[in-house]
Image: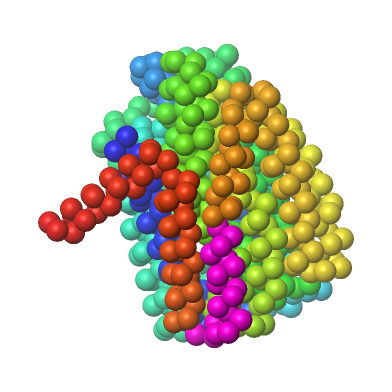
Amino acid sequence: MNQKKTGILFSYLIMVFNIAAGLLYTPFMLQKIGDSQYGIYSLSVSLSSFISLLDLGLGQTLVRYISKARALDNKEEEARLNGFFLMLYSIIAVVAIIMGALILWIYPVISNKSMNGDEILLFRVVFFILLINTVFSFPMCIFSSTINAYENFVFLKAVNLLMIIIRYICCILLLAFGYQLAAITLVTALASVLTQIIYAIYCKARLNIKFSFKNYNKELINEIFWFSFFIFLNLIIDFLYSNTDKLILGAIHGTFAVTVYSFGIYFQNYFVELSTAMSGVFLPNIVYLYERKKDMKEISGLFLRVGRLQMVILVLALGGYIALGNEFISLWVGDAYKDAYYIGLIIMVPALIPLTQNIGISVLRAMNLHKYRSYMYLVIAILNVGISIPLGNEFGGIGTAVGTCIACIAGQIFFINWFYSKKIGIDIKMYWHNLVKFVFICVPGIICVFFFKRFIPVDKWVLFVVYGVIFTLVYFILYWFLIANIYEKNLINSLLCKFFRKKKL
């Protein structure tokens, strides 16, 4: 439990640091490399994410089955799993090289009307660096998955935070001395490689993991294949939701449209992190509850408890974005990117529901029922692409955001809530009852900020901070006195006591 709490704390520290660093680093980077290079970087990251889909969901599958082997105290099975996944990932790395070579050849041909010769050359260099990093990460991700399955979250997150800090410092220095996109991409890749090496050393020295390449359980391998296949479908869907819009805009409208859209989903990315920072540590625990106890009542209770804690943070973040997001973008990168606010808003509002239900994904994987979610999401993802292409062609970034919004409502809200309620037995009515209460306490703060903005517009960072503090105080006062339950009050009090005790020491 201490590992979970500290792991969640580190996750939020990483997120807060990324947000704070991004607020300072992104405009600095944009100023140094320009709109064109920033758009190329965003495209390259999206396409390297496409290569990452070759993971096939094996990383999360490994966490699930190692957690199961540990729950059953089967060391031999654990060693065979490690050996099997290492062999499989090595094959995937070779396939990734071939696929990356095809992308290096094909995508510049598709985009030759919206990108000039210099942009195409830079794209190839940047994407090649990211490709090598992705290929290396395939076999090495066994070690981070193992640390996750062993619930050693403190080490996992602490190393990640340290390397993020080092990466930002190095990138800022390079940009300050006149280096461009290729150099900072190389530094980012090297930081990722070093992180994976540290995880590998830890697994061998501290966890003493073993590898066995014989006596594979064919029945188990078949089960792993199907389990992983449906996670792979989910990864495809996640990729389509998060990257297709940028690829469409890059091919139709050029790199500036990609840059505007990237700023719009910049906040959505952190919105997602706010959710996964908490839910990501519970898969081993849910596997234990299901494999050893078959206790669906306790799992449903965990779903609601974690969901409420996520609502505290995510509703605050969304309400703050609604109230002050437009002014933030103007102060941050300028009025030229004002469409980014509406893009972010269109995507973030419906995303609130699935993100406060993120732990449900772990429940489905623990019960090996995630295939039903995958079937539906695949259909919705294809629909998303079909809607986003004509909307993007006609209305640009806002059009593609509307397409993504429609797909999210159809699949991630209507279908999945029905499935959780009818097929799993989770108390979805109570979830919606909780969500309505959180939205209700968020509205007064938004109204208050909009009222003050009519008389004193937000044209300085100082005013932005003041209004942000006002909104936060109104929200938390209403939360504490109207809807916080005993569990949440005790949790917050214990965290505050620990914090102030450490300050005194």
Viewer-closest of 168 and 413: 413
Q: Position of residue 239 (x, y in %)?
A: 66, 50
**What residue sits 49% from the left and 29% below the top?**
301
The residue shown at (18%, 59%) is 503
| Residue 310 percent across, percent down from the top left | 49, 46
Looking at the image, residue 372 sits to the left or right of residue 19; the answer is: right
Instruction: Quadrant for the N terminus, please.
Output: top left
Asked if 136 appears above or below 284 in the picture, the reply is below
Q: Which residue is at 61% across, 50% downward?
A: 352
Residue 371 in magenta stretch: no
Q: Residue 371 falls in which quadrant of the image?
A: top right
Asked if 162 appears above or below 181 in the picture, the reply is above
Frontmost residue, 66 versus 88: 66
Q: Position of residue 192 (x, y in %)?
A: 43, 55
In the depicted structure, whether residue 311 falls above or below residue 426: below
The relative height of residue 14 versus residue 331 in the rendered view (above or below) is above
Q: Is residue 190 left or right of residue 270?
A: left
The answer to whether residue 314 of the structure is visible from this angle is yes
Kindly indicate the quadrant of the structure image that contains residue 500.
bottom left
* Quadrant housing the C terminus: bottom left
Boundaries of the magenta span: 442-461
Q: Residue furthest left?
A: 505
